């Protein structure tokens, strides 16, 4: 286990490797917290010095539909690296054989050669990681790593650090850009956690899954070796649910798919016949009479929990 560090801005434990900055798997800090640009001007007037704060640097452009747009300028590392997810689930004590994608992007104006340092727990070996790679200016590449081995129960850190002629690279960027909010860059490390858990999967377990909004639960179930079949709301109306032991409804699925309200009687009938139904977070539709087996209510404003 690497020595823990405390992050003053997010309050979460960080893990670090000796001689390297902390890697922070699955922890993102917004542009406002870390990389907001600012400009100041110093003027000399009649022998006097005047400092003027100009505020953040803003890129202004004209959209043909929306009109004038203003986006804040933020810092970008010369090279970014990122895995698809910040967490991978595995069964403790069982063989691991998994492909992981590492996305690389250069923001540099010239070629950059990266040499890689692997941060991996004992018991896990990695194939297909080259000792070095060269990215042309503004080039993007993908590397696919094969993780194999066995881990005992616990949480482990896995990461890649790239060394270049100008320094070290160990982070990626995710941009959140919607019309109703200011664009935000989230910076996260080129690392993730491997969570090894003791789990016994019944031979009869078979899951039908109706995806909700922002829903990434089904891939995690598959990582643990649980058989999952995705069903659309339309398929739920005609599928033979007797083939499944469990039906999972994703978060806010009733709001996103009104068909679920129409076909809700099939969900209740599945439960009455002995099936297990798991309904995740929802809002107004779930409070309608007849949707849930028993009446439920939501507090206003609804309390939120964020992980």
Image (cartoon, rainbow, N blue to C red):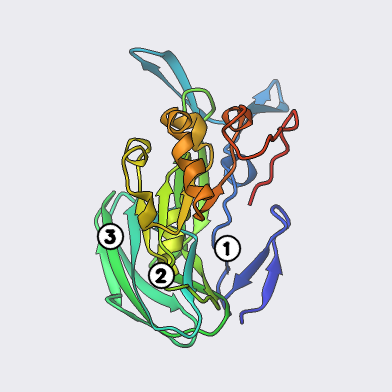
Give the vertical position of 291 relative to 220 (above or below): above
Residue occupied by mark 1: 24
Q: Is the residue under label 2 in contact with that under label 1 (CB below 8 Å)? A: no
Give the vertical position of 201 relative to 301 (above or below): below
Q: Position of residue 60 (x, y in %)?
A: 45, 21
**Disc 1 packing (10 Å; few <14; some 14–19; many ≥20):** many
- Residue drawn at (66%, 26%) of the image: 44
Q: Quadrant of residue 290?
A: top right
Residue occupied by mark 2: 225
Nearest the eye: 81 or 26? 26
Can residue 76 be seen by looking at this rendering? no
- Horizontally, residue 3 falls left or right of residue 117, namely right
Q: Is the residue under label 1 in contact with that under label 3 (CB below 8 Å)? A: no
- Horizontally, residue 53 falls left or right of residue 123, namely right
- Residue 102: numbered disc: none
**Disc 2 packing (10 Å; few <14; some 14–19; many ≥20):** some
Q: Is the residue under label 3 in contact with that under label 2 (CB below 8 Å)? A: no
- Residue drawn at (38%, 58%) of the image: 228
Considering only order in the chain, which callout, 3 or 2, is on the residue closer to the N terminus?
3
- Residue drawn at (34%, 58%) of the image: 103
Q: Quadrant of residue 231?
A: top left
Give the vertical position of 225 relative to 136 (above or below): below
| Disc 3, SS | strand
Distance Cα–Cα, label 1 vs label 2: 27 Å
């Amino acid at each position: 286990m690497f020595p823990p560090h405390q992050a003053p801005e997010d309050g979460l434990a960080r893990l670090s490797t000796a001689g390297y900055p902390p890697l922070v798997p699955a922890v993102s800090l917004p542009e406002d917290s870390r990389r907001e640009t600012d400009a100041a001007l110093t003027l000399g007037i009649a022998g006097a010095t005047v400092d003027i704060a100009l505020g953040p640097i803003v890129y202004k452009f004209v959209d043909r539909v929306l009109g004038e747009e203003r986006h804040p300028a933020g810092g970008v590392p010369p090279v970014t690296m990122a895995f698809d997810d910040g967490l991978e689930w595995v069964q403790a004590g069982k063989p691991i054989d998994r492909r992981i994608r590492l996305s690389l992007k250069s923001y540099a104006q010239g070629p950059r050669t990266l040499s890689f340092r692997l941060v991996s727990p004992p018991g896990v070996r990695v194939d297909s990681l080259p000792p070095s790679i060269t990215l042309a200016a503004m080039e993007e590449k993908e590397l696919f790593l094969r993780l194999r081995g066995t881990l005992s129960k616990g949480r482990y850190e896995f990461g890649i650090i790239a060394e270049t002629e100008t320094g070290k690279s160990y982070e990626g960027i995710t941009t959140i850009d919607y019309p109703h909010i200011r664009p935000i860059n989230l910076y996260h490390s080129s690392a993730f956690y491997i969570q090894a858990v003791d789990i016994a999967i019944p031979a009869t377990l078979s899951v039908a899954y109706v995806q909700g909004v922002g829903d990434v639960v089904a891939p995690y179930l598959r990582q643990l070796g649980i058989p999952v079949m995705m069903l659309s709301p339309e398929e739920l109306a005609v599928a033979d649910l007797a083939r499944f032991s469990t039906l999972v409804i994703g978060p806010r699925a009733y709001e996103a798919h009104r068909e679920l309200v129409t076909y809700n009687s099939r969900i209740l009938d599945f439960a009455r016949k002995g099936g297990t139904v798991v309904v995740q977070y929802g809002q107004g539709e779930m409070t309608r009479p007849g949707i849930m087996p028993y009446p439920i209510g939501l507090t206003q404003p609804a309390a939120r929990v964020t992980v």
